[in-house]
Image: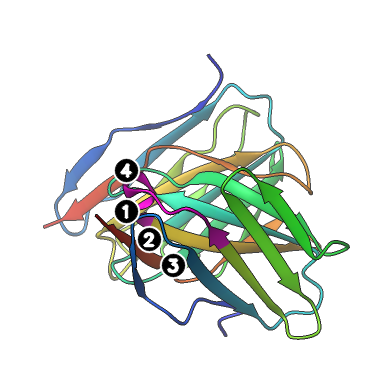
């Protein structure tokens, strides 16, 4: 079955530690995205990538980093520079410009 | 700057009646609009979309209306069912493949 997989579903980290969230898709989609959702807020774009080895900052990229070495994978690193890292993180992918994006199940990150 | 706005954080509708969710946008370059449905602790799932060259798109119980002059779109669900209870996000695309989402509206269908 084709799909987009995020792991882990729940993640706990101590303050000051970097943490990497995994996102893998086997849909052969070119574009991939990372969003963050906080309670009572919409999805805010962190980073996106339209092709391998290329990515752009979204609206709230500070404190985050990404890589796109393979078409299938778009990992997100939450660094210690991110002031409020506790949130629900969603990865998505899409084929082209005029199409719906498919989302993963999300990773809930809690920093203590 | 919130380019896509859903001004109603919540909506409660009786089962069997029509649910109308609204969305406003400010960027006139948006040319494709989508609605997503989201359950707690899950990723959003695509529901229905509309191109800016159309003013209506229908899929079963779901209809999306687009009013470009007012920069407004709405999602109609009729008849509403208990399984429709979820958070609904509208989203828009312009130019560089960047989906912009609204804040979401929590729809509750009462029996």
Q: Answer few, some or many: residues within 10 Å of disc 1's Cα (few below 14, many 20 plus, some between 14 and 19).
A: many
Nearer to us: label 3 or label 2: 3
Residue B90 highlighted magenta (yes or no): no
Q: Please state if A56 lies on the left or on the right of B101 as rendered.
A: right
Q: Residue at x 34, y 44 (%)?
A: B83
Farthest top residue?
A1
Circle number at residue A37: 2
In the image, are marks 1 and 3 on the same chain? no
- Marks 2 and 1 close (CB-CB < 8 Å): yes
Foreground pick, B68 / B62: B62
Farthest left residue?
A112
Quadrant position of residue A101: top right
Residue under numbered circle 4: A107
Residue under numbered circle 3: B104
In the image, are marks 3 and 2 on the same chain? no
Q: Residue at x 36, y 42 (%)?
A: A20
Letter of the chain that mark 2 sits on in the rendering: A
Residue B83 highlighted magenta (yes or no): yes
Q: What is the span of residues highlighted in magenta in the rendered image?
A: B76-86
Q: What is the spatial separation of the Cα atoms under label 2 and label 4, in whole angstroms?
A: 10 Å
Q: Earlier in the sequence, mark 2 or mark 1?
A: 2
Residue under numbered circle 1: A88
Q: Answer few, some or many: residues within 10 Å of disc 4's Cα (few below 14, many 20 plus, some between 14 and 19).
A: many
Q: Residue B20's spot in the image, x, y percent?
A: 51, 68
């Amino acid at each position: 079955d084709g799909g987009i997989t995020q792991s882990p579903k729940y993640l706990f980290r101590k303050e000051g530690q970097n943490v990497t969230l995994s996102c893998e898709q086997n849909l052969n989609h070119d574009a991939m995205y990372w969003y963050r959702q906080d309670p009572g807020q919409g999805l805010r774009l962190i980073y996106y990538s339209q092709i391998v080895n290329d990515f752009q900052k979204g609206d709230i990229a500070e404190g985050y980093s990404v890589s796109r070495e393979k078409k299938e994978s778009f990992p997100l690193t939450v660094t210690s520079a991110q002031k409020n890292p506790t949130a629900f993180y969603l990865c998505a992918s899409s084929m082209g410009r005029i199409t719906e994006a498919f989302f993963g199940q999300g990773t809930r990150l809690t920093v203590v | 700057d919130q380019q896509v706005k859903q001004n109603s954080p919540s909506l409660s509708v009786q089962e069997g009646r029509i649910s109308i969710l609204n969305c406003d946008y400010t960027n006139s370059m948006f040319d494709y609009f989508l609605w997503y449905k989201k359950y707690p602790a899950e990723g959003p799932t695509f529901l229905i979309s509309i191109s800016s060259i159309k003013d209506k798109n229908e899929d079963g119980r779901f209809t999306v209306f687009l009013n470009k002059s007012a920069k407004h779109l709405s999602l109609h669900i009729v008849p509403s069912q208990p399984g429709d209870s979820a958070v609904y996000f509208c989203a828009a695309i312009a130019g560089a493949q960047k989906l912009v989402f609204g804040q979401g509206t929590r729809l509750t269908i009462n029996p």
